[in-house]
Image (spheres, rainbow, N blue to C red):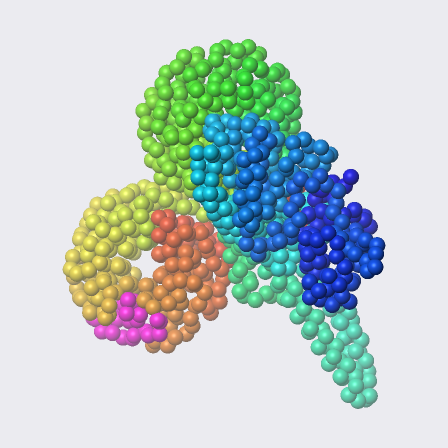
C-alpha cells in the first residue's frame, strides 16, 4: 500500500514510477498538467472530447500532456470506444483529502481550508460545525473514522495538518485529555500553523495545552448563538488569508525538499523564489510565524540560485576563453595575410565583437549573483534573522571582491550596506541545532564552559559554547522540560514530562532517578550548597529531595500546576510560580512565608537577583513584576505583547531579560525601561541562561534551536537614557566625551564607553542644539523656551543665559576662533553674541524661521538655512553675500567644507545640494526617501541624516558609498569625533548610536570581522562543504 506521505514522491523524469496521485504532487506539477488534473478530479471518467470542450483547448494540444500524466501513473486509461480517462489516486484511507485540492491551495482562492482536530465524543458537534463551514465554502480536512485502521493513518493526519491553512481545535473535557489530539496539536505547532480554539463544552483552563490556552477562544457551546459564533470563526479564518496561504504553500514545498534528502530539484527558483523571499521578509510579527523549515528552505533556495548563477558564469568564462583563443588565431592570420584584402579584418571584427559580448554576459551574471545574495540578506535582516543575513551578506561581499569587473557603484553600495548592517547589528554568535523537538530549557554550567539543553525529543544534550556536542543523555521516556547544573558543575539534574527527575554526572552517566510526583515535572534546581534539589510539578506540588533521591518534604499550598521554582542565592528562601496566578515564598525547610499576588494569569517564571534583594516573576498576562524578597511589590512592567515564558537577572543584577511567545528576548533596567530587544528565533522563546560573567546569553525555544548571543557590540554602542526624542549630539573638542540633548529638556554627558557621567536639567522646554566652545570650557544649548544657555560641561554649572529671541531657538554655534556665538530662531533672526553672553548684532535673516547657522572655518562668514527653502551667506556685520536657491523643501542644515570653499545644504525635499560660494550648484545628492535633516563633511566625503531613519555616506563627487540603517525614528543629527574614529547619530527613537568608522565602507575589514564572528558556526554546524569554505578563500 503506497503511503500518502510527501516522502513517496519522485519527480518527473526519474526512474521510479508512481502508483497514483498524492495531494502534494499537485504542488509541483506543471501548470498545464495541474489544470487537467484539477478538472478531472471533479469527475469520475472523461473522454478527450470532454477535456477539449471544457478546457477550451484543441485535443491535439492536450494529447501530449495527457500522455505524460498517463506515463507517470497519475491518470488511468479505461478501455472503451472512445477511451475514457480518470485520475488514479494513490492508495489511502479516504479520511482527509478534499478532491478540489489545487483550488484549496491556490493562493488566489478566496477561502481558507481547515483541519479540524477533535475528540470522537464530540462527533455530533463537529458534524454540525462541518456542515456550517461547508455552507460558507470552506474545504475541511476531518477524520470521521474512530479507529486508525490503516498503516498510513498518522502520516495522513500529518499531511492534512501540513496542507491546511488553519488548525481548528475543538475544546472539550474529552479533547484536552486525548493523546491523539495532543499529538495533532504538537504537529501543528511544529509547523507554526495558525490555530483557532473552538469551545463546544466548558473546560478547565489549566488542562488546556499551553499554546491553545494563550489564544482567543471562540465559544460555540449550547448556550451560545451558533450562527454568530460561526460568523466569528469565518472572520478569524479569513484574516490575513494571503499571508497564511503562502505559509501553507511554501511549507509543503519545503516538506517535499526535506523528505527528499534536500534534493536541489525541489528548491524554489525564479518568481517562486522571489515571492517566497518577499513573503518571508514581510512576516515580521505576523501569525502564524514562519516555521524553521520555511527558513531553511528559502535560505537553501537563495543559495542554490546563487550557485546556478555561478555555474552560468563559469560556462560564460569557458566561452570567453574560446573566443580569446580564436581572437589570437585571427589576429595572427590577419597580420600574416594583410595582402589578402578585407576578409581577415572582418573576421577579426567579428571575433572582437564576440569577445566583448561574452565579457558583458559574464559581468552581468556576476552582478546578478551578487545582487541576489544581497537581496536575500536584506530580506533576512528585515525578518529579524540577522545571523543568516550576515551569512548571505558575507557571500555577497566575497563575490564582490572576486568580480571580474568593477560592479556598478549602486551595487557596491548595496553590498556594503547589507554587510554593514549585519555586522553592526548581529548579536547571535552561534546556533546549536541537533535537537528534534522543542528545546524547553537551557542552562550554562557554573564556569560557563558547558551548555545543557532539555528537549521534547526526550534527551538532554551537553555542548561546548562553540557548538561541539559533548554528550546526549537519554533515559527520559517523554519530553524533558527542565535541566540544571549543580554549583560545582559536576552534576546535572533533569525534569521530565514522564513525572521523573534524573541525576547525571557531567560526563553523561546516569546516577539515579527520582520518582514521586504525580504529573509532569516542569523544573528542578540545586540548592546553593549543592546538597538538595527542589522540583516543581503539574501536580500542584513542590518537592525537596536529598541527592540520593530521598524525599525531604512536599509543599502543597499551590492549587494549580507549579511552573518554576528557585532557591535564593543564600539558600534561605525558595520561590515558586504557579498557574494559580501567584508567587509563593517559602523557608528553605519548606515552611510557607508569603503569597505574592498581582498577576492576572499563569505565572510561568521567577528569578532572584544575585544579591538576593529582589525577585522577578513573568506571567502569561504579558507582565513582569519586580518584588522585594520580603514580598513588597516594587514595579510592574508591561514587557511583551504575548506570553512570557522566562525571566532571568543578569549576572551583575542591574538588568533582567525576558523571553516570550512573541519570539523575542528583551532586556530591561530595574526601573522598567527597555534596553534592547533580540530577535532571531522563529518560534516561541522558552528559556534563557546567562554566563556567570554576563558576557553571553543562551536561549532556546520552539524552533528546536539553541542560540548563543554576545551581549557586547564591539562596533556599535547605544546610548539610552533620554526619555524623549534626541535632537542633537556633539563631541567635546578633546574627543573624550559627547553631549546629547532633546525633547526631555536635559543635557547628558557621556564617556566613549557609553556610560552617562552627568545629566543637567537645562531648560523648561525641548532643547534643539548644542555647541562646545573650541577650548571645551563651555557648552551652549538652545531651546524652545526662547533662550540660549552656557554651561560648564565639567561641573554642569550654569554660566550665562542669553535672552532676546522671541520664538524657539533652533541652532547655536561657537565660532572656530572661540570669540563669537551665533544663534538662529523661529523669529526669523540670527543673533551674534560674545562668549560671555553680550548681544553684538541682530540679523533679520529670512522670511520664515531660521533652522540652522554655521561659521565658516575662518570665523569670518555665517551660513544660514530656513523654512523659506533658501540658504544664505552673511558677513559678520549682517550683509548678505549670497543666496542659495533651488531646493523645494525646508533647509534643516547647511555646513561649510573644511576648506570653506564648498557648501552643503540638507533639505526636506529629500536631497542635499552642493554649492560653491558664488551660489552655483555643483551637485545634488539623491537617495534618501524622506527629508534630509543633517549633513556633515568628513575627510573622504559627506555624511547625511534623514527622516527616512537612515544615514548615508557619500564620496565628494556625489557617489553613494553606503547606507547606515538601524534607527527606528528620524535621525536628527550626526557628529564625527575629532579623530574620525567614531560617528554619533541622534534620533527620535530616544537613542544615540556610536558607530566605529574603521569599518564603514571598508569591504575587507567587514569580511574579516564577519569571519571572526562566524568561526564557531562554520566549524561545527551541519553545513555543506561550500559553506564551510566561506571564510577560507
Q: Which image quarter is the N terminus in?
A: top right
Q: Nearer the viewer, residue 523 or 235?
A: 235
Quadrant hosting residue 399: bottom right
In this picture, is 364 found above or below 497? Answer: below
Q: Nearer the viewer, residue 464 or 292?
A: 292
In this picture, is 734 found above or below 371? Answer: above
Q: Nearer the viewer, residue 914 or 493?
A: 493
Q: Residue furthest front?
A: 81
Q: Which residues are magenta?
A: 860-888
| Residue drawn 38% across the image and 53% down it | 969
In the drawing, does residue 989 fall left or right of residue 174? Answer: left
In this picture, is 207 found above or below 999? Answer: above
| Residue drawn 42% across the image and 16% down it | 557
Q: Nearer the viewer, residue 332 or 252?
A: 252
So how many labels did they put on this image? 0
Q: Position of residue 713 (x, y in %)?
A: 47, 44
In this picture, is 878 found above or below 168? Answer: below
Residue 409 is inside the magenta segment:
no
- Residue 248, visible in the rendered structure: yes
| Residue drawn 47% across the image and 58% down it | 963
Quadrant hosting residue 96: top right
Residue 880 is inside the magenta segment:
yes
Q: Position of residue 884 (x, y in %)?
A: 32, 74
In the drawing, does residue 313 fall left or right of residue 745? Answer: right
| Residue drawn 50% across the image and 18% down it | 534
- Residue 778, visible in the rendered structure: no
Q: Position of residue 79 (x, y in %)?
A: 84, 54
Q: Position of residue 662 (x, y in %)?
A: 47, 40
Amino acid at each position: 500500500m503506497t503511503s500518502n506521505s510527501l516522502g513517496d514522491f519522485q519527480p518527473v523524469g526519474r526512474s521510479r514510477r508512481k502508483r497514483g496521485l498524492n495531494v502534494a504532487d499537485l504542488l509541483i506539477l506543471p501548470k498545464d498538467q495541474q489544470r487537467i488534473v484539477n478538472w478531472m478530479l471533479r469527475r469520475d471518467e472523461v473522454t478527450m472530447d470532454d477535456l477539449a470542450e471544457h478546457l477550451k483547448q484543441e485535443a491535439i494540444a492536450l494529447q501530449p500532456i495527457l500522455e505524460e500524466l498517463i506515463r507517470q501513473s497519475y491518470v488511468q486509461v479505461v478501455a472503451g470506444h472512445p477511451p475514457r480517462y480518470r485520475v488514479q489516486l494513490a492508495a489511502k484511507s479516504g479520511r482527509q483529502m478534499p478532491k478540489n485540492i489545487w483550488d484549496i491551495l491556490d493562493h488566489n482562492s478566496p477561502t481558507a481550508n481547515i483541519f479540524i482536530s477533535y475528540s470522537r465524543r464530540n462527533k455530533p458537534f463537529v458534524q454540525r460545525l462541518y456542515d456550517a463551514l461547508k455552507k460558507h465554502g470552506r474545504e475541511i480536512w476531518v477524520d470521521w473514522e474512530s479507529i486508525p485502521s490503516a498503516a498510513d493513518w498518522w502520516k495522513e493526519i500529518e499531511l492534512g495538518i501540513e496542507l491546511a491553512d488553519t488548525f481548528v481545535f475543538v475544546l472539550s473535557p474529552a479533547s484536552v485529555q486525548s493523546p491523539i489530539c495532543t499529538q495533532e496539536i504538537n504537529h501543528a505547532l511544529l509547523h507554526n500553523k495558525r490555530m483557532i480554539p473552538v469551545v463546544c463544552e466548558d473546560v478547565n483552563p489549566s488542562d488546556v495545552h499551553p499554546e491553545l490556552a494563550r489564544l482567543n477562544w471562540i465559544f460555540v457551546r449550547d448556550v451560545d448563538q451558533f450562527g454568530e459564533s460561526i460568523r466569528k470563526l469565518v472572520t478569524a479564518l479569513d484574516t490575513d488569508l494571503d499571508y497564511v496561504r503562502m505559509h501553507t504553500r511554501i511549507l509543503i514545498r519545503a516538506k517535499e525538499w526535506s523528505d527528499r534528502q534536500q534534493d536541489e530539484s525541489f528548491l524554489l527558483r525564479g518568481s517562486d523564489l522571489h515571492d517566497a523571499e518577499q513573503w518571508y521578509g514581510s512576516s515580521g510579527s505576523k501569525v502564524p510565524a514562519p516555521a524553521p523549515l520555511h527558513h531553511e528552505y528559502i535560505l537553501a533556495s537563495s543559495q542554490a540560485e546563487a550557485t546556478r548563477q555561478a555555474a552560468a558564469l563559469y560556462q560564460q568564462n569557458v566561452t570567453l576563453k574560446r573566443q580569446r583563443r580564436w581572437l589570437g588565431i585571427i589576429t595572427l592570420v590577419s597580420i600574416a595575410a594583410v595582402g589578402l584584402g578585407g576578409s581577415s579584418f572582418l573576421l577579426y571584427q567579428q571575433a572582437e565583437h564576440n569577445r566583448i559580448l561574452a565579457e558583458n554576459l559574464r559581468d552581468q551574471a556576476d552582478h546578478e549573483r551578487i545582487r541576489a545574495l544581497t537581496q536575500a540578506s536584506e530580506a533576512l535582516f528585515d525578518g529579524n534573522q540577522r545571523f543568516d543575513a550576515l551569512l548571505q551578506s558575507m557571500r555577497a561581499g566575497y563575490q564582490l571582491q572576486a568580480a571580474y569587473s568593477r560592479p556598478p557603484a549602486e551595487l557596491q553600495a548595496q553590498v556594503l550596506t547589507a554587510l554593514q548592517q549585519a555586522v553592526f547589528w548581529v548579536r547571535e554568535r552561534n546556533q546549536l541545532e541537533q535537537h528534534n523537538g522543542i528545546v524547553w530549557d537551557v542552562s550554562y554550567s557554573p564556569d560557563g564552559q558547558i551548555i545543557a539543553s532539555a528537549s521534547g525529543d526526550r534527551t538532554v544534550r551537553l555542548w561546548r559554547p562553540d557548538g561541539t556536542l559533548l554528550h546526549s543523555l537519554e533515559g527520559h521516556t517523554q519530553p524533558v522540560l527542565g535541566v540544571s547544573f549543580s554549583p560545582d558543575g559536576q552534576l546535572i539534574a533533569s525534569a521530565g514530562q514522564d513525572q521523573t527527575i534524573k541525576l547525571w554526572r557531567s560526563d553523561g552517566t546516569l546516577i539515579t532517578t527520582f520518582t514521586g510526583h504525580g504529573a509532569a515535572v516542569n523544573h528542578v534546581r540545586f540548592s546553593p550548597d549543592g546538597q538538595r534539589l527542589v522540583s516543581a510539578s503539574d501536580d500542584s506540588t513542590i518537592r525537596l529531595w536529598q541527592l540520593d533521591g530521598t524525599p525531604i518534604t512536599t509543599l502543597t499550598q499551590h492549587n494549580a500546576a507549579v511552573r518554576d521554582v528557585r532557591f535564593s542565592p543564600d539558600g534561605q528562601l525558595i520561590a515558586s510560580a504557579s498557574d494559580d496566578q501567584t508567587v509563593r515564598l517559602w523557608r528553605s525547610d519548606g515552611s510557607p512565608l508569603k503569597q505574592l499576588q498581582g498577576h492576572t494569569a499563569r505565572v510561568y517564571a521567577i528569578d532572584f537577583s544575585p544579591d538576593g534583594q529582589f525577585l522577578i516573576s513573568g506571567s502569561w498576562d504579558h507582565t513582569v513584576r519586580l518584588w522585594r524578597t520580603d514580598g513588597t511589590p516594587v514595579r510592574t512592567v508591561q514587557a511583551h505583547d504575548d506570553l512570557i515564558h522566562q525571566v532571568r537577572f543578569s549576572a551583575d543584577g542591574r538588568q533582567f531579560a525576558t523571553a516570550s511567545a512573541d519570539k523575542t528576548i528583551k532586556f530591561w533596567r530595574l526601573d522598567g525601561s527597555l534596553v534592547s530587544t533580540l530577535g532571531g528565533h522563529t518560534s516561541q522563546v522558552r528559556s534563557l541562561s546567562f554566563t556567570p560573567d554576563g558576557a553571553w546569553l543562551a536561549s532556546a525555544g520552539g524552533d528546536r534551536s539553541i542560540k548563543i548571543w554576545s551581549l557586547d557590540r564591539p562596533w556599535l554602542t547605544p546610548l539610552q537614557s533620554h526619555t524623549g526624542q534626541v535632537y542633537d549630539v556633539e563631541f567635546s573638542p578633546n574627543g573624550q566625551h559627547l553631549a546629547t540633548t532633546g525633547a526631555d529638556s536635559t543635557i547628558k554627558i557621556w564617556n566613549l564607553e557609553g556610560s552617562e557621567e552627568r545629566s543637567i536639567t537645562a531648560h523648561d522646554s525641548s532643547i534643539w542644539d548644542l555647541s562646545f566652545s573650541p577650548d571645551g570650557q563651555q557648552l551652549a544649548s538652545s531651546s524652545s523656551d526662547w533662550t540660549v544657555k552656557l554651561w560648564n560641561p565639567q561641573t554642569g554649572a550654569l554660566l550665562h543665559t542669553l535672552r532676546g529671541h522671541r520664538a524657539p531657538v533652533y541652532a547655536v554655534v561657537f565660532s572656530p576662533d572661540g570669540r563669537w556665538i551665533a544663534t538662529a530662531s523661529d523669529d526669523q533672526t540670527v543673533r551674534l553674541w560674545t562668549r560671555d553672553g553680550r548681544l553684538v548684532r541682530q540679523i533679520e535673516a529670512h522670511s520664515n524661521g531660521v533652522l540652522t547657522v554655521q561659521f565658516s572655518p575662518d570665523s569670518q562668514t555665517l551660513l544660514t538655512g530656513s523654512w523659506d527653502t533658501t540658504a544664505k551667506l552673511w558677513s559678520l556685520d549682517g550683509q548678505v553675500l549670497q543666496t542659495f536657491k533651488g531646493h523645494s523643501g525646508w533647509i534643516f542644515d547647511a555646513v561649510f567644507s573644511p576648506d570653506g570653499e564648498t557648501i552643503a545644504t540638507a533639505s526636506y525635499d529629500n536631497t542635499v545640494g552642493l554649492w560653491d560660494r558664488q551660489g552655483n550648484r555643483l551637485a545634488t545628492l539623491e537617495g534618501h526617501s524622506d527629508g534630509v535633516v543633517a549633513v556633515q563633511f568628513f575627510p573622504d566625503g559627506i555624511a547625511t541624516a534623514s527622516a527616512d531613519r537612515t544615514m548615508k555616506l557619500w564620496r565628494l563627487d556625489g557617489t553613494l558609498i553606503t547606507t547606515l540603517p538601524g534607527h527606528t525614528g528620524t535621525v536628527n543629527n550626526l557628529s564625527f569625533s575629532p579623530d574620525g574614529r567614531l560617528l554619533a547619530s541622534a534620533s527620535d527613537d530616544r537613542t544615540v548610536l556610536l558607530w566605529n568608522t574603521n569599518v564603514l565602507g571598508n569591504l575587507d575589514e567587514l569580511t574579516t570581522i564577519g569571519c571572526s564572528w562566524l568561526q564557531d558556526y562554520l566549524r561545527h554546524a551541519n553545513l555543506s562543504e561550500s559553506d564551510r569554505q566561506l571564510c577560507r578563500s
